[in-house]
Amino acid sequence: MRPEILNPLFAEVDTLDGVGPKLKKPLEKLRCTRVRDIAYHWPDRFVTRRPVETLDEAGEGEQIIIALTVTEHRSGASRRAPYRVLATDSAGNVLALTFFGRASYTAKKQLPVGEKRRVAGKLERYGDMLQMVHPDHVMKLDDAGLGQMREPVYSLAEGLTQPRMASLAAQALEKLPDLPEWIEPGMLAQQKWPAWADALRSVHARDDETAKDRLAYDELLANALALQLVKADNRRKRGRPLAGDGSLRDKLQLPFPLTGAQERSIREIEGDLAQDAPMLRLLQGDVGAGKTVVALHAMLVAVEAGAQAALLAPTEILARQHFETLREMARPTGVEVALLTGRDKGRARESILMGLMDGSIQIVVGTHAIFQEAVQYRDLGLVVVDEQHRFGVSQRLQMTGKGKRPPHTLSMTATPIPRTLTLANYGEMEVSRLDELPPGRQAIDTRVVGMDRLPEVVEAVGRHLASGQQAYWVCPMVRDEEGMEKAAAEQRYAALKARFDDDAVVMVHGQLDPEVKDAAMARFASGQAKLLVATTVIEVGVDVPASTLIVIEQAESFGLAQLHQLRGRVGRGSEKSTCLLLRGNQLSETGQRRLALMRETQDGFRIAEEDLELRGGGELLGTRQSGDTPFRIATLDQMQRFLDPATADAKLLMDRDAGLEGERGEAARILLYLMERDMGVRTLRGG
């Protein structure tokens, strides 16, 4: 149960004065549904205004407060045209107060002709006329409300105003309870951080970096502590040790030797599987590093020990790809591998369900369908999660409810993740890294080409296809939308289909029906189709070794790690492969750095670190792509500065007070609820 002291913060936002159904909608858009959310909705910036008597005293671009007399209202020629209210200062200088859209209705009420008003806003010039677009404040001369010379500017949604948001923030801050301190005293003193409530009040009043750091640390500490609690809880659980005898793995006939990184990771996994405590391990591997082989070894250990294994993939395309790969590799062992997706119906589905229940199916691959209530296992010992979408901690734990005892869990990610984000997202897991590529893999020839050379590129693709090889053509969006100039898969597909043999070109994107997608992928994988036009739906897992050319259109619009993943669709066979990055004419400095780095290196871990620097935590790794970091407060810079000390402090607290029963432990429990990391508290007995 949430501590009572936090109840005022978790009250619904409509408990604040002035919030009715009309205001709740824009607040919901800002993810402000409770008092706590308002308190943590900080100003984006602060504006300082200068009061002036006349416009002559002010400079263009300056924020001012000035008294004006309204002289005239001018409607535009159309609805979209601006609505202008002309007013003069005490010296007779004219200022146009300009409004767009519905704001004109408010202007008519607030600014009657002949009346004096004080207005606050930014002074600008439009042609020969001085203007103020959408003044921040319009008030009567005797109204004492105007007037902070320094004022917070909040991000808003339609229907909210700055004064209203400031009023809600003030009310939320009044409700802050007096909470005990959870930060270790030495850290608090060293950083000279204010108390929690003082820090929140400060960030709403001024641009206080010290207060922001303290509040970011709170979030990082809560996350680290929750992950430590989950880890400790997992160690307490009694799982089933799985020790294989090697009889199945000895039968594998892999066409290549394992790399040192693969052998190391397999040993680490075998060591975990042999323990009573269920394994929680993350397998990170660069494009083509051979995660699937490592996962198969782990699954065969489970089968050798008399248990079943399940591999969960985020999409049907990827599930089918894994199924085909695992079935082929496992064929010499005689192990039964099955595929189960949400599309399987009737007798085929019943047959798979029976096989899982009686144990005749030893390995199952599928989407979330493999964890539905109707799916029962005879003895599920290992769950492998292909974690493209980075399931949260709570979701990762839910997946382990299908075994008689908690099964072992191996999470895989095809995206190399910077250490900072690994610690933030997967702090409850042990980590194995595949940082070597299998022998025989050739470097991919990566070139950057301007869009003005598109006809030449199309001709080059034609020659490539004529030689009997296959190719990908990737676009950043599905279809062209009005006003958008990004390359669209549907338009490019139509153009390439007209240029080449009609049957040679197929298309895949996320908005197609699954059957259509699967049919197109099957034709491409079998070699019937030579050119696959796609969006980033092929980013992970698609494996067609005969495809040796990829064209990525408007490459500058993709993130670095996403480009790296897309490039990884080629170079999967023994033939030399090429990646053409087509760039637009307007290339930012960041875009230039991205494309230059793609030419320079194929090291996914280096690319991920650079991506983190270039894009920041919010857009990382191509899957909205952000690595979705679990943080709303901490910035990338704060994560890099404070994540290690927060993790160390969480471990120290756990060592001293694993049950969080002591004085600081109780404070830490409050922090976990405050930061909504209470899944950590739930692992505590009686928590």
Image: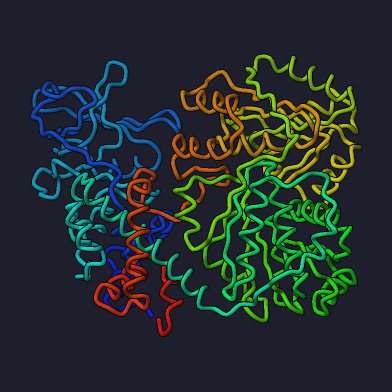
Seen in the picture, residue 33 relative to 293 is either above or below; the reply is: below
Which quadrant: the N terminus?
Answer: bottom left
Name the residue at 40% across, 61% down.
224
- The residue lying toward the viewer, choosing from 266 and 382, is 266
Pick whichever, 404 or 669, lies toward us. 404
Percent across and percent down for residue 135 are 26, 37
The vertical placement of 104 against 92, above or below, is below
Residue 569, by quadrant, is top right
From the viewer's perspective, is residue 203 above or below residue 494?
Answer: below
Residue 280, image x, y percentages: 57, 65
Residue shown at 61% from the left, 51% from the top = 413
Position of 19 with respect to 476 (left or right) is left
Residue 499 location, x and y as percent? 84, 22
Is residue 550 visible from the viewing direction of this image? yes
> x, y percentage for residue 535?
69, 39
**Identity of the residue drawn at 62% across and 27% down:** 554
Q: Is residue 14 visible?
A: no
| Total number of numbered discs in the rendering | 0
Residue at figure coordinates x 70%, y 71% from the top left: 243
Give whichever of 164, 648 is nearer the camera. Answer: 648
In the rendered view, would you say 290 is above or below 487? below
Q: Quadrant of residue 270?
A: bottom right
**Image color mode:** rainbow
